[in-house]
Image: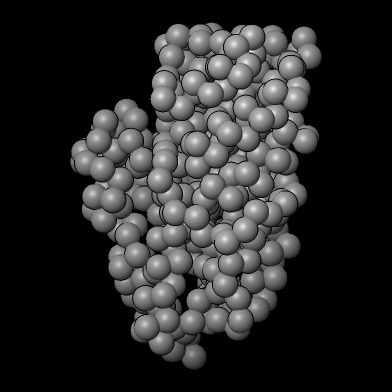
Amino acid sequence: MRNRFFAELAAAAVANPDIVLITADIGFGAVEEFVSRCPDQFVNAGVAEQNMTGLATGMALAGARVFTYSIANFPTLRCLEQIRNDVAYHHADVTVVAVGGGLAYGALGMSHHATEDLAIMRSIPGLAVAAPGDAVETSAVMGELLANGGPAYLRLGKSGEPDVHPRQMRLCRGESIPIRSGGGQLAVFSTGAILDATLKAADLLAQAGVRADVRSFPWLDPLDTVAVQDAANRYDTIVTVEEHSITGGLGSAVAEILAELPGSAPLIRVALPARFSSLVGDQDHLRRAHGLDPAAISARVLEQLEVNRGLAAQAR
């Protein structure tokens, strides 16, 4: 995802001198192509994310189209006041880009986990929030952001995520993507780089006799409410999967919609617990430890389905 983001941004910046990239002294090994092609459109603000965001807003209000970039939670939580008061309030054309969403930088510890970012960013009025699931979705989201601008937040994986989609696509802001469909019992919604693990979990559910249709939500704000409402009417159960705290992310956004629908399908939220992790390790290790690998996702769904059946039987 990271490499695709930089490729898309560099190509756009060559054609549009108003596009500017500002980093917080990170990205070496990834930003070089952009710098070599567009040296006058790149600024290293240093390890000073608040300054980076204020600088980005000033440049945007002067006519630039600015992308800020840093690791995980640093371009969001460290400079939240500047995002809220400067970028969003002034509707500045700034896209805040975080690389390593979720537990991607797990080996560096809790300070580098981005596990509350989606909740916080989608609560800011006027800020679009995107978390693509693979490089193809990253290209589609970037196409929309480059066409229509910020304020926006783009959450990326780190690198090496497998492509789920076989070909490039266009994507409107707020549009979700059906990946598997065909009359499953469950609708499984995924956001961000955990998409591949979600599809593998759906395969395990099928082996257990539970058919699951899968839909990717690369946009959390605006959210594809039509797709959620349709799923509430057509499926027995809706499942959300995200590498984010169970508080405030995709599961919460879907729950907000379902709460206003009479007789909608029950919801199973698969996410990180609402507490900080003291574990250190690579992303795969931390996903397994926190129940976000394919086997744990499918087991969680099967367990909750059994609970729901018992509750339904008692109600009868």
Circle count: 0
The structure residue drawn at horizontal position 56% and vertical position 31%, both measured from the top left corner, is 6
Residue 279 vertical placement versus 41 (above, below): below
Direction from residue 247 to residue 276 in the image, left or right: left
Q: Residue at x 35, y 42 (%)?
A: 103
Please name whichever residue, 158 or 221, is drawn nearer the observer in this view of the structure. 158
- Colour option used: one colour
Q: Position of residue 27 (x, y in %)?
A: 44, 23
Q: Is residue 283 positioned above or below 87 on the image?
A: below
Q: Quadrant of residue 313?
A: bottom left
Viewer-side residue, 294 vs 222: 294
Pinpoint residue 100: horizontal percent, then vertical percent: 42, 36
* Left or right: 210, with 234 as reference point: left
Residue at the image point whose x is 49% and y is 82% from the top: 211
- Residue nearest the viewer, comparing 114 with 27: 27
Image location of residue 170, percent across then percent down? 72, 51
Q: Is residue 288 left or right of residue 145?
A: left
- For the question of whether residue 265 can be seen, the reply is no
Note whether 235 is above or below 162 in the view shown: below
Which quadrant would residue 16 be assigned to in this image? top right
Q: Is residue 268 left or right of residue 137?
A: left
Determine if residue 169 is in view: yes
Residue sitting at 39 percent across and 69 percent down?
Answer: 201
The residue nearer to you, when weighing 279 against 166, is 166
Image coordinates of residue 227 in percent, x first then y, are 69, 64
